[in-house]
Image (spheres, rainbow, N blue to C red):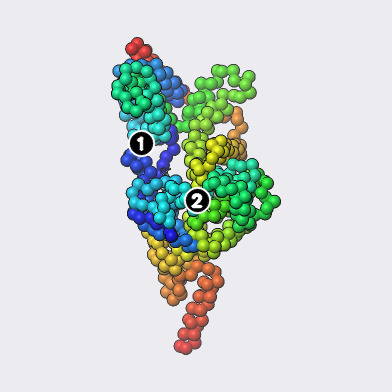
Amino acid sequence: MPIILENVSFFYSKNTPLEITALKDVNLRIEKGEFVGILGENGAGKSTLIKLFNGILRPDSGKVTIDGLSPSSKKAKSMIGMVFQQAADQLFCRTIYDEIAFGPLNFGYSRKETEERVLEALEAVYLDRTMLSRNPFSLSGGEMQRVALACALALRPDYLVLDEPITGIDPSGKKEILETLKKVKDQGTAVITVTHNLNGLFPLLEKIIHLQEGRISFQGSRKEYLESENVPLPPIAAMMRELKSSGIQVNPALFTVEEALEEILRVKSIIEKKKTEK
Amino acid sequence: MQGPVFSFVPGDSFLHTLDPRTKLAAVMLLGILTFRTESFFGIVTLFVFFFALASISGLPARVFLRAVRPMILFIIFIFFAQLFFTKGHVLTSFWILNPSLEGLQNGLRLSARFILLLLFAALMTASTDPSAITSGIERMLRPLPLRWLGVNSFELATMMNLSISFLPILFERAERTKVAQASRGMYFGKNPLRSVSALAIPLIKGVIRDAEELALAMESRGYQGTRRTSIHELRMQRRDWISLFALILFADFMLRF
Ligand SMILES: Nc1ncnc2c1ncn2[C@@H]1O[C@H](COP(=O)(O)OP(=O)(O)O)[C@@H](O)[C@H]1O
Ligand SMILES: [Mg+2]
């Protein structure tokens, strides 16, 4: 069962002169096990969109359902794990153990079940068990972000939703977060991530939703995304498109260095063959 | 984009060109006046006075909407608390609630006063450059024997000014924390104390961190905590004295009701 949004619109400060249209007529469907990227410029409505998934915000018109349930129901909330960009804004316990246990305990799991979930979540984010008794505020930014991720994973969510998970994280922390997300996805959880860092997360995305001024301007597979106009591209894809538009017949829908190199060499050999034939 | 509450809107109106001290004194005086005014006629007069100043200032209406908006719930709460809990002539009664006539009057009066306070404060902050406010406060505090407390008037003024500019950041931070904890099921938890600490601790730690960062940034840009030569050489002009005099006459007139 999926997350479904039907004709969803959302306004901040509705019916006042300060009204802001944050989302307009958004339709989307996210299935379990998908890896979805929500892209768009600052202020496009990405963060607003994900806050609709767990009922933090309610749509002003249209309908949001999580596996057919209302997003503000307890059942639906326990199916959605949220990780926000500013991890430090949520840490408050004396130990990392308590921090990760906060969610499962709130949703009424027993001490024993909670402990199991804490250990599982910690392992999933590649943090060491010796960390459990440490104070979350003694951590580096990257580690804090991973603890916040573990907090969400401890709910064993069906949908893991992340706002800019790797923006501002050092490369090593980044790698571990990406590994975790891959693993979580392979276990059948939907991973939905807001990002404008096209480099790090792009290779993992299967489906892309591009927001522009509160409307969905593109929705489709990554391949379709690379072929469509007026969307921001990762650097390699942008370069390939440049090559194509300057008359070199490469396939522009590529984004990794290896693929690009291979493609360029392929085209080069074709060009050289033509020359010798002449 | 969303602008912060109580921020400065540059302009060249009469209000913009007044000395910050004049405006600080005016806000204090108007604040006292607002809370000393009992009659509805008086409160209406103050609103008229506000609208007159606001139109002189040429500030857009959204400046004032923004100042009042975050407090709306609080004001509504005050209104209803007064309405239902003031004893007097019962208007109607339904369920266990007995709104009284006196309650209605008190409620309207108190909410109107709060709104007036916010409006006058917004009028000052929107028409005065923040650094001019700092200089103004500093000059007003200078005669006080603050050295005994281990601070000087400039430090105190900077502190006040920073606290005001920190408020929007604080609200934003509180909102982010609330959202993050709600996502972890805070509202389903059984222990209300835990919810309080889940909100308060990240907030306090965050604010302390912000403050430390700000202090470092200020020091690395040469802030010494001592008075510096100000770009705002404060001089009371004739128009300042006239404004103050007019205001005092106005206050005198209002207090006679
Ligand atoms: N709490 C809020 N109050 C009013 N307006 C807001 C609030 N949060 C966001 N907005 C506005 O809604 C729009 C969408 O914001 P947001 O969803 O945060 O965008 P993004 O995450 O894509 O940068 C922006 O114009 C933003 O200024
Ligand atoms: Mg955002």
The single residue placed furthest to the top in the displayed view is B256
Q: Is B120 located above or below residue A163 in the figure?
A: above
Left or right placement of residue A222 versus residue B209 in this view:
left
Which residue is found at the position 47% from the left and 61% from the top? A32
Query: Is B119 on the left or on the right of B233, as rendered?
Result: left
Q: Which mark is residue A171?
A: none
Residue appearing at x 44%, y 21% in the figure: B28
Q: Nearer the viewer, residue A177 or A133?
A: A133
Report the residue at 51% width, 37% height from top. Answer: B170
Q: Identify which amino acid the numbered label 1 is placed on.
A: Arg
Image coordinates of residue B128 in percent, x first then y, are 43, 30
Residue in view at x 35 percent, y 15 percent: B254
Vertical side of A102 occupied by B86: above or below: above
Q: CA distance from mark 2 to mark 1?
A: 40 Å
Are labels 2 and 1 assigned to the same chain?
no
**Residue B82 drawn at (x, y percent):** 38, 23
Q: Secondary structure at mark 1?
A: helix
Residue A78: numbered disc: 2
Instruction: Name the amino acid type tagged 2.
Output: Ser
To which chain does the residue with label 2 belong? A
Q: Are marks 2 and 1 in contact (CB under 8 Å)?
A: no
Chain letter of mark 1 equals B
Q: Residues within 10 Å of mark 1 (few under 14, many from 20)?
A: few
Q: Secondary structure at mark 2?
A: helix
Q: Is residue A159 above or below residue B4?
A: below
Residue A71 in percent (x, y) is at 43, 50
Residue A236 drawn at (x, y percent): 50, 66
Residue B5: image quadrant is top left
Residue B102 in view (yes/no)? yes
Q: Which mark is residue B62?
A: 1
Q: Nearer the viewer, residue A105 or B86?
A: A105
Mark nearer the viewer, 2 or 1: 2
